[in-house]
Image (cartoon, rainbow, N blue to C red):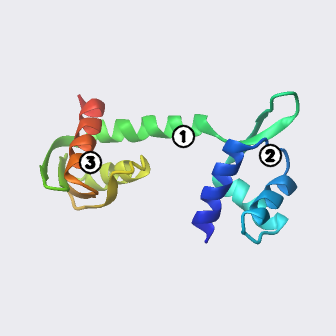
Amino acid sequence: MKASRHRKIIELVGTYNIETQEDLALRLNEAGFQVTQATVSRDIRELRLTKVPAEGGGQRYAVHQAAESGMNEKYMRVLKDGYVSMDMAQNILVIKTVSGMAMAVCAAIDAMKWEEVVGSIAGDDTIMCAIRTVDDTVQVMDKINKIVL
């Protein structure tokens, strides 16, 4: 319920000029989510929404992008530093890392939230990623190659 509410909040702030918590609560209630102002306040904090200038003056809520791109750079650096090689077996991607780095590289891949990746597990120097399709596996390998090469 919380995850679907968070997805709806991101959709709403991307679509409408939502200026206040009350505006957001009203939109959520209209969408079928029974929320209080306290719930909306907590969701705003958890989603790290920020106020940005709105067209025509005033301010509106928006998803804070700067922190995301900064974090992606950190994740990309971890991936680059720990990566050794990779190979695929159908829709399973096996990534070899420097000894002791698999957990960090795995966490970095998970944090990038690539839609193709269903999930991943890590050992000491090996990661197994379950990918949605064989074609998606090739796409993920291309993404990783662009980062590490």
Mark 1 crowd level (few <14, some 14–19, many ≥20, 10 Å Cα): few
Residue at image point 19% right, 51% down: 134
Query: Which residue is under mark 3?
Result: 136
Q: Locate the C terminus by quadrant.
A: top left
> What separation in Å lies between label 3 and label 1 (alpha carbons)?
23 Å
> What separation in Å lies between label 1 and label 2 (alpha carbons)?
21 Å
Name which residue type carries label 1.
Answer: Glu
> What separation in Å lies between label 3 and label 2 (alpha carbons)?
36 Å
Query: Which residue is under mark 2?
Result: 18
Q: In terms of depth relative to the viewer, which is nearer, 109 or 74?
A: 109
- 23 left or right of 144? right
- Asked which secondary structure carries label 2, the reply is loop
Name which residue type carries label 3.
Answer: Asp
- Residue 115 vs 53, above or below: the answer is below
| For marks 3 and 1 on the same chain, the one whose residue lies earlier in the sequence | 1
- Residue 27 vs 62, above or below: the answer is below
Query: Which residue is under mark 1?
Result: 68
| For marks 3 and 2 on the same chain, the one whose residue lies earlier in the sequence | 2
